[in-house]
Image (cartoon, helix red, strand yellow):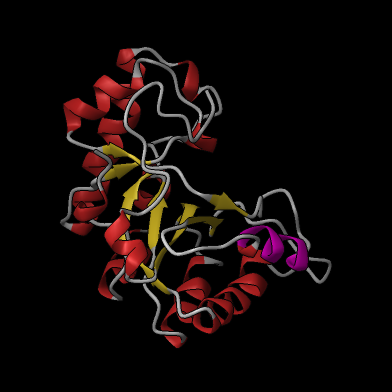
Amino acid sequence: MWPRSTLLGANLVRLPMAAAQRGEVALTFDDGPDPEVTPRVLAILAQYNARATFFCIGTRAAAHPDICRDIVAQGHTIENHGQFHRNRASLSGIRGWKREVGNAQATLERITGRRPQFFRALAGLRNPFLDPVLHHFGVSLASWTRRGYDTRCGDADTVFARLTSKLDAGDILLMHDGHSAGTASGNPVVIEVLPRLLTELAARNLTPVPLNSSCKPS
């Protein structure tokens, strides 16, 4: 059940060594697309000329296909975060995982014209039935190196500190464009943290990149 564990199968928790040597990190956003937040995230990324990966929920993508197409058109990648994103997904059997992964694969490919290469489980929680399903669909599991807990914490300073503490080349950072917590002013915390994070990456000579086929875990 531990999100970064490799005991249940291959799990991408860091970028490959070659990417780390190039000073690359991966920015990933979960739980979208969100019609209020995702376009604002895209605008910030464009301002900093940064590329990222969006782990989208199938039903949300189907409700907002134009946002998904904007994500891809702006040079980012869309990956699989499940069709329904139900809290009990980690208790699924083979059939349940096939529906969750397979339906999202079909939904996202239909919208974007590209078949996702990676799957991220809700909160990273899974069971032994997931790995064979991922093999069946030709998808790799991806988790993260560090996260800001930005669905629970609305304090931008705290989220920023969690993402940047011991930050290093090769890290995969987890944020949320869906279900983002609000700050005291009511702003989604990811909107306040992201510009600071991108500025910090530049100061450390780290380049944000999307996940791609060269990142697949061995």
Residue 66 in view in this figure: no
Name the residue rendered at 22%, 58% in the picture: 112
Check the image and name the residue furthest to the bottom: 47
Which portion, as a residue range, is magenta?
156-163
Q: Main secondary structure of the magenta part?
A: helix
Farthest residue in the top direction? 93
Residue in front for this viewpoint, 176 or 218: 218
**Identity of the residue drawn at 47% across and 24% down:** 89
Q: Residue at the spot x=19%, y=50% of the render?
A: 110
Snapshot quadrant of residue 33? bottom left
Instruction: Pick the residue in front: 8 or 80.
Output: 8
Q: Quadrant of residue 166?
A: bottom right
Locate residue 190 relative to residue 214 in the image: left or right: right
| Residue 161 painted magenta | yes
In the picture shown, does residue 167 fall above or below 195? above
Q: Tell me: 4 left or right of 102.
A: right
Nearer to the camera, 72 or 203 = 203
Q: Quadrant of the C terminus?
A: top left
Q: Which percent across, then down, holds residue 196?
A: 63, 78
The answer to whether residue 106 is magenta is no
Task: Estimate the x, y position of residue 149 in percent, counting from the top left.
Answer: 66, 50
Query: 6 above or below 210?
Result: above
- Relative to 155, 15 lies left or right: left
Residue 119 image offset from top left, x and y in percent: 34, 40
Residue occupying image coordinates x 27% and y 52%? 215
Residue 148 % position (x, y): 64, 55
